Image (cartoon, rainbow, N blue to C red):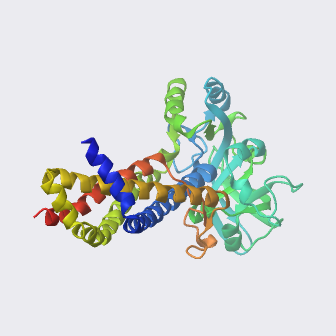
Amino acid sequence: MKIIYKMAFRNIFRRKGRSSLLVTVIAIGVFAASFAVSIANGWSKGVYREFIDMQTSYLQIHANKFSNANEVTEFMDKNVVQQALDAVGEVDYASYRLKTNALLSTANTSVGLTLIGVDREEEMKVSSVYSTIESGDGSFFESDIVRPIIISKRSAERLNVDIKSRIILSLQDSSGEIQRVMFRIGGLFQTNSKSFDNTTAFVQKSDLMPYLNIPGEAVHEVAIVVNDLRECDNVKQKLSQLLPEYEIKKWDEIYPLMQLVNAWHGIASFLFLLLFFIALGLSTTNFMMMSVLERKGEFRMLNKVGMSENRIGLMIIIETLFTTLIATSIGLLLCVIAVSISSKSGIDITFLFDRKSGYGFGTVVYPMIDKIDFVHIFVLVSAIGIFTTISPIKKVLK
């Protein structure tokens, strides 16, 4: 058996021209497929990070009866929640928010949205919305404006307002009374999610609290950042035991669509690799056929000196495996180099998606490749390489 491995390995280098051509074809195919998967991985991670950093954080806590209706009366005690969070070591940061529905009105029109009352320092540790406020579009509660409100550029266009414009905010307090108060535009943000931008505004918690008629330590929502995304399940379990009367949700439970995206991303990546390498295998089948048929004399001679047909077939398969593994290694190495370069600067896909489209992801993708992708590629290339030699082996052994 050892002699077969030696002969197979030597045969690769004995026909350098043919082997080099086959290695080049497979290596280019592996590089193209793996780099395409790395781009898809980067895009997928960008979508997750967009939702986590801008909208959901890692975990959220609400009162059990709190719903999308944002009822002012369904609040929690901040001290109770804070005590529980302090007992969980994996929790890094938390933002204690007020949350209610409000109507923003100008002389021309009105817009209904969700109003979030935050503490600036707390919010900047759990959300990256502040980073989307560009120079000239105000700030995230850093100006000397009295009662500032931060709205999206999309909402500003609908309301026809700009920085420092006055706006009337109408909301319902805990007793059902309508409260109206004047705010001024303090900043304009723009995320990559049109739905979030069209339905969300921020004010300082201290400016909102007097108009809700609720206790001073009341909070409607707590957004949490943990030290590792993979610890979310563990932290959720601990908090559920400490706060059984409250509802704790992970980021993918807040937006169930993210669970579907996560599941389908893995399936789609594997199917893409499978179809790509099947196509690559079909395109190299004729090459393998010619490569094997031109060696009929060699195989006939080996058969006469005592090598069985099965061993000849096994030698051809081993040659193919050696060649494909060398080519795959070269292709993946090129992919790793390309990913290491492009992951720093990113790949701008503005030509495909306008930044203002608001599909929920950015126009710069940072490619990344996972270990499981390497495993899939090696397995698929090896399997398809063997299948492409079956037909040539049958012909030459007839």
- At horizontal 47% and vertical 62% (from top left) the residue drawn is 31
> Where residue 386 sits: x, y (%)?
26, 57
Residue positioned most to the left: 398
Quadrant of res 304: bottom left
**Residue closer to the observer: 336 or 81:** 336
Q: Image height check: is 255 above or below 223?
A: below
Say which quadrant the N terminus sits in: top left
- At horizontal 78% and vertical 48% (from top left) the residue drawn is 207
Question: Is 288 situated left or right of 80 in this image?
Answer: left
- At horizontal 70% and vertical 68% (from top left) the residue drawn is 153
Say which quadrant the C terminus sits in: bottom left
> Where residue 6 sits: x, y (%)?
32, 48
- At horizontal 81% and vertical 52% (from top left) the residue drawn is 141
The image shows a total of numbered marks equal to 0
Question: Is 98 situated left or right of 371 in this image?
Answer: right
> Where residue 326 sits: x, y (%)?
42, 55
